[in-house]
Image (cartoon, rainbow, N blue to C red):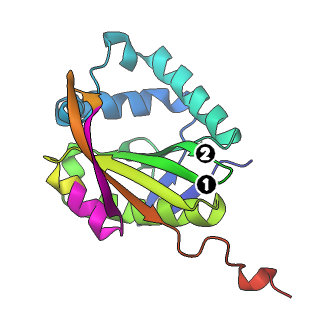
């Protein structure tokens, strides 16, 4: 399966190669303080260059196995990452669903970048991966994420107590999902 490659406003949205590990490593190092309140506590070796090379190899293998798509948003020169979004835990069969996670560089918050990126990648996931449901969960205090998901058409489906261990504490999450209303409808070019 060829690696997906999208362009948007001069940016490149694709899966990073293991040779680009230093670029994604730098994204997370630059955003450590910004992301700490929304992520699990990471061991010091989590962000080593070798750990990122290994992780990017795993992400490509998961993509090839149809188990996840781990996008990075690169600048036009493909030298810096501005955001990431991951469609993980793809489950087929009767479910046809996945989980969505995302983050944006602190310097690009509030500029509409994540809305544009997610709009494009959600459309890709529904059309190319033929998913029926994308689930995204957020900490209630993360109002910005809640507004973003609502704007993207995600609907609240529940509230999970002590759902994930974030920054060393079990945190409640609001559960949301976006359903592909076009799932299973044949495309005009596929009809006789």
Q: Which mark is residue 30?
A: none
Q: Residue 11 is drawn in which quadrant?
A: bottom left
Side of 66 relative to 113 (left or right): right
Instruction: Locate residue 176: give its quadrant.
Output: bottom left
Task: Give, as a single range, the part of the protein colored magenta.
Answer: 146-163
- Please name whichever residue, 24 or 34, is drawn nearer the observer in this view of the structure: 34
Q: Nearer the viewer, residue 26 or 69?
A: 69
Coordinates of residue 56 in the picture (x, y in percent):
54, 30
Q: Is residue 148 magenta?
A: yes
The residue beneath circle 2 is 91
Q: Earlier in the sequence, mark 2 or mark 1?
A: 2
Q: What percent of the width, then of the height, locates residue 126?
A: 57, 64
What residue is at 18 percent from the left and 55 percent from the top?
A: 144
Question: Residue 125 vs residue 137: left or right?
Answer: right
Was residue 182 drawn as part of the magenta stretch in this picture? Answer: no
Q: Is residue 84 visible?
A: no
Left or right: 162 as drawn, with respect to 63: left
Closest to the observer: 173 or 153? 173
Horizontal arrangement in the rendering, residue 116 relative to residue 125 (left or right): left
Establish if 55 lies above or below 92. above
Q: Are marks 2 and 1 in contact (CB under 8 Å)?
A: yes
Find the residue positioned furthest to the right. Answer: 192
The quadrant in which residue 111 appears is bottom left
Q: Secondary structure at mark 2?
A: strand
Label 1 Cα crowd, 10 Å radius (few <14 / some 14-19 / many 20+): some
Secondary structure under the numbered disc 1 in the rendered image: loop
Report how far apart the C-alphas of labels 2 and 1 lie in the structure.
6 Å
Q: Position of residue 113 (x, y in %)?
A: 31, 60
Residue that badge 1 annotates: 96
Where in the figure is residue 179, as x and y percent of width and height? 48, 66
Q: Is residue 135 visible?
A: yes
Q: For the residue carrying disc 2, how many other residues have a C-alpha within 10 Å: few (<14), some (14-19), or many (20+)?
A: some
């Amino acid at each position: 399966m060829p690696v997906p490659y999208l362009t948007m406003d001069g940016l490149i949205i694709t899966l990073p190669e293991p040779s680009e590990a230093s670029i994604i490593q730098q994204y997370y190092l630059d955003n450590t303080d910004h992301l700490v309140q929304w992520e699990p506590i990471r061991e010091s070796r989590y962000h080593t260059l070798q750990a990122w090379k290994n992780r990017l190899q795993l992400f490509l293998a998961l993509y090839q196995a149809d188990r996840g798509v781990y996008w990075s948003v690169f600048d036009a020169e493909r030298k810096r990452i501005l955001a990431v979004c991951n469609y993980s835990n793809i489950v087929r069969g009767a479910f046809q669903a996945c989980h969505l996670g995302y983050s944006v560089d602190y310097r690009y918050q509030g500029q509409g970048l994540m809305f544009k990126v997610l709009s494009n990648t959600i459309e890709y996931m529904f059309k190319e991966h033929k998913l029926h449901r994308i689930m995204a969960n957020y900490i209630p205090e993360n109002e910005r994420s809640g507004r973003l998901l609502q704007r993207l058409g995600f609907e609240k489906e529940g509230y999970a107590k002590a759902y994930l261990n974030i920054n060393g504490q079990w945190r409640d999450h609001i559960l949301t999902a976006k359903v592909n209303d076009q799932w299973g409808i044949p495309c005009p070019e596929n009809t006789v």
